[in-house]
Image (tube, helix red, strand yellow):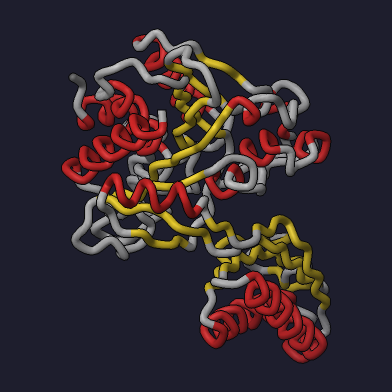
Amino acid sequence: MTGFRELWDQLAPIGRDPGSGGYLRYAWEPAELACRDWFRAQADARDMPVEEDGNGNLVAWRGAGDGPAVLTGSHFDSVPHGGAYDGPLGIVSAFLALDRLSDKPRKRIGVAAFAEEEGARFGVPCLGSRLLAGVLDPDRAAALTDRGGSTLAEALGRTPTGRTDLLDRVGCFAELHVEQGRALGEAAVGVGSAIWPHGRWRLDFTGEGNHAGTTLMADRHDPMLTFAYTVLAANKEARLSGAHATMGRVAVEPNATNAVPSLVRGWLDARAAQSETLQALAEAIHKRAVERATRDGTAVSLTEESVTPEVAFDGGLVARLARVLEAPVLPTGAGHDAGVLSGYVPTAMLFVRNPTGVSHSPAEQATDADCEAGIDALARVLDELS
């Protein structure tokens, strides 16, 4: 029987940056496409036919049982220089969990590889699952552009299909994922209960481009100052409200050392335990930015790009899996495809312990022993559900 390390080592080199040690696997770019080829090869080796849903999502099917299917899986794509385990662990574990099921499943089981979960290329997280669930308009998605100006339609080779009958054929979904914190403690595997509300906003700071050497400090209308103040304000407002706020992406025009910028564009990622807190946080940050812009002689606009309300996983399913696995139950502040699908099918998550507590970074970790425990747990879950 194939072990975790043997299969993991086949996938691990794909898209790894030798400098940072992190991963550059962007949706429909060469590294992520190579992961898809690996997925098809694993499915072929197990005589599992692969279905493409027209939105970039892949599903490999096992069995031909009657009734609604059981779906598992995760994603291959990464944030820039992200960790190895976020996403791919759920797909590798799914294939290996199926290998460990001694009997043919009573229901069909699908292993899914969802497209653009991180949103690192086209800016919308869980893009593939949103399209599949019908919560994102296919024409709007087709027009999304990456930083190089390519559209999603060009990357996909077509306008996305949007909602199909795939979810109508699914009875439940269980996603295994590496823990993105250190809440599990002594437990190797836990069961997810909920996902915090979270969203992304774009802030455009406009000012007056000018010469860095000849423009008096008193005469400047520098949007970088407004942006810098807003970053600090976001940090303060998040701490005051017990929420999370991050501005980890920025674009500057003309982006020259000897020029006062004319435009600074920053992206805000915000998360909170309640939707009301999240909305109030975004509004407070915008208000502070506008107040500062008035003093700087600049202007700022806020554009909501995506907001996901609180997701509580199916209570009965969570309790059932926690009982079967004798595992702790914990919430997460990270978004997942499971959060999107939970509005349409009963959904739960399994988390594999991360000793560093670090994610979206090369320091993200999971021991082979814990990964094996995760595979065993997922096998038990699939056996229970099928």
Quarter of the view holding residue 137: top right
Q: Quadrant of the C terminus?
A: top left
Is residue 220 something one can see in this rendering? Answer: no
How many discs mark residues in the rendered view? 0
Q: Looking at the picture, how far across and down is residue 286, in whole percent?
A: 74, 78
Q: Quadrant of the N terminus?
A: top left
Front residue of 134/180: it is 134
Inspect this view and state whether residue 172 appears.
yes
Residue found 30% across the figure and 59% down from its top: 328
Picture coordinates of residue 156, whole percent (x, y)? 68, 25
Q: Nearer the viewer, residue 116 or 260?
A: 116
The picture places residue 317, in percent across and down from the top left corner, at 45, 47
Residue 292 rendering spot, x and y as whole percentages:
74, 87
Q: Is residue 197 above or below residue 79?
A: below
- Residue positioned 37% across, 17% down in the render: 42
| Residue depicted at 64% across the width and 83% down the height | 229
Rendered image quadrant of residue 144: top right
Q: Establish if 54 lies above or below 228.
A: above
On the rendered structure, is 59 left or right of 369?
A: right
- Taking the image as shown, residue 368 lies to the left or right of residue 282, namely left
In this rendered view, identify the residue nearer to me: 60 or 211.
Answer: 60
Q: Residue at x 36, y 59 (%)?
A: 329
Relative height, residue 167 to residue 229 (above, below): above
Whether 336 is drawn above or below 150: the answer is below
